[in-house]
Image: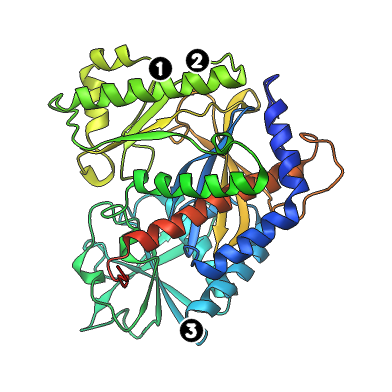
Amino acid sequence: MVPHLITALTGPINELEQRILDSMPAIERWFRLEWMEHTPPFYTSVDIRNAGFKLAPVDTNLYPGGWNNLTPEMLPLAVQAAMAAIEKICPEARNLLLIPENHTRNTFYLSNVAQLQRIFQMAGLNVRVGSINPEIKENTTFELPNGGSVTLEPVIRGKYRLGLKDFDPCTILLNNDLSAGIPGILEDLHEQHLLPPLHAGWSVRRKSKHFECYEEVSKRFGKLLGIDPWLINPMFNQCGEVNFAEGTGMECLQSNVDALLTKIKRKYKEYGINEKPFVIVKADNGTYGMGIMTVRDVKDLEALNRRTRNKMSVVKDGQSVNQVIIQEGVLTHEQLNDAVAEPVVYMMDRYVVGGFYRVHADRGIDENLNAPGASFIPLAFEQSAHTPQPGMKPGASTPNRFYMYGVIGRLAMLAASYELEATDPEAENYD
C-alpha cells in the first residue's frame, strides 16, 4: 500500500525516482565499494520525509525499537541479515544477551524486544534478555498485547564480562540508547562484543555530527547521479549554548534560524516551489520525539510561551537540553486515509529488511509525527527494496517507490557509519 502524494509537485520526485532506477547498477556497486571501506552500524532505522520536490532523511536511530511494527513477511529477510551481521562479528557466536531500555512497563516497547529475540533465535543463537534496571532484581515475565510474553533477567557483572545466571554470552546487543549516560556496568567489557558500541549512544552522539556526515555522503551520491544534493539532504545549523528554561542563548538560536530560513527560501525560489519554508528545532541528542518544535518565522521565537520552553528544555530520562540542531523542515506530502504519513526504513547490517509508515491524524504536513497518537502501518519492503520494476512509469509502482526509500535509508546508514568512525574513542590516529 503506497500512500498517495497529495501534491502536483511530484515532478521532481518522479524524476529522482527515474534517475535512481536508471542508475541502479551504479548505485548498488557504489554501496558495495563503500561497505568494503566502512562498517555498517549493526542495525538502523531512518525516518524519511517525501515533500514531492525533495526526499530526505530527518532522523537516524542506531538503537531502533519498533521491530514489532514490521510485517511477518519481513521476518525471513531480517533473520538472513542478522545471520550475516553476526557471522561477520563473531562467527562462532552461540549466546546473545539482549539489553533493553529501562522503561519496563511499556508493553509495546517490550513487544519489540520479543521480536528482536525471535529474529536472533531464528538466526541460530540462544537469546536471553538481561535488564540493567536496578528495579529488576529477579526474573520478571511480562505479558504482551499479542498474547506472547517476554522474561527480563537481572544482569550479573564479572570482572571483564557481563552475563546472567548460568548464561555467558559472547555477544551483547544493546537496545538501549544510553540517553541517561553510559552505566558503569557496560564499561570495560574487553572480552565480549558489544553492539552497537557505547559511543553510538546519545550520551556521546550528536545529530549535527550525523547530518554533517550525511551532507558529505549526499554530495558524493549527488555527483554519482548528476543531481543537486539538496534534493536528498536537509540543510542544518547548530546552536551550542541554549537554555530554554532560563531563556538564555536565544540570540544564537534566532540568528541561526533566520540564516537557515533565508537559505531555504533561496532554494525554493530556484526550484519554483510555492510552499512556506520552515525549520525544525530539536535537541542535538536524544530521541522519542521529545524536545522538538516547528518554527515558521523567526518572530515565533521571541514569543515562546512557558509551556513550549518547558517542553524544549528536557528530553528522555530528564536530560536537560542546551545544544540544539536547527534542521531544514521537509514537508510530508504523503497521506494515508487523510492523515499525514512518513516512511520509516529498517536495516540490519547493510540490508534493508522492512519498514512502516508512521501516521498521525492530528499533525500537519510540517510537524513532527513521532508523538503520542501516532499509529504504524506496516510496509513490506521485502520484495521491493532490492527488486525494483524497471520500465514502470515513475510514481506508479510500489516497489520502485520503496526501492528509492531504501536507497535514501542506506545513505543515512552510511553517514552513521562515517559518524561512528569519526567519534570512536579508540580509533587509531594517523595524523
Q: Amino acid at mark 3?
A: Ala
> Left or right: 308 with respect to 277?
left
> Left or right: 181 with respect to 40?
left
The answer to which quarter of the image holds residue 309 is top left
Residue 121 % position (x, y): 54, 74
Q: Earlier in the sequence, mark 2 or mark 3?
A: 3
| Residue beneath disc 1 | 296
Closer to us: 136 or 77: 77
Q: Earlier in the sequence, mark 1 or mark 3?
A: 3
Q: Amino acid at mark 2?
A: Lys
Disc 2 crowd, CA 10 A, few/some/many (<14, 14-19, 20+):
few
Determine whether the residue tagged by mark 1 lies in a helix, strand or loop: loop
Residue 429 % position (x, y): 30, 70
Residue visible at 32% across and 45% down? 286
| Residue beneath disc 3 | 93
Disc 3 crowd, CA 10 A, few/some/many (<14, 14-19, 20+):
some
Q: Nearer the viewer, mark 2 or mark 3?
A: 2
Determine whether the residue tagged by mark 2 lies in a helix, strand or loop: loop
Q: CA distance from mark 1 to mark 3?
A: 51 Å
| Visual colour scheme | rainbow
Q: Amino acid at mark 1?
A: Arg
Residue visible at 60% across and 68% down? 81
* Quadrant of the rendering where the C terminus is positioned: bottom left
**2 and 1 marks in contact (CB < 8 Å):** yes
Q: Nearer the viewer, mark 1 or mark 3?
A: 1
Q: CA distance from mark 2 to mark 1?
A: 8 Å
The answer to which quarter of the image holds residue 80 is bottom right
In the rendered image, the residue lying farthest to the right is 391
**Residue 276, disc:** 2
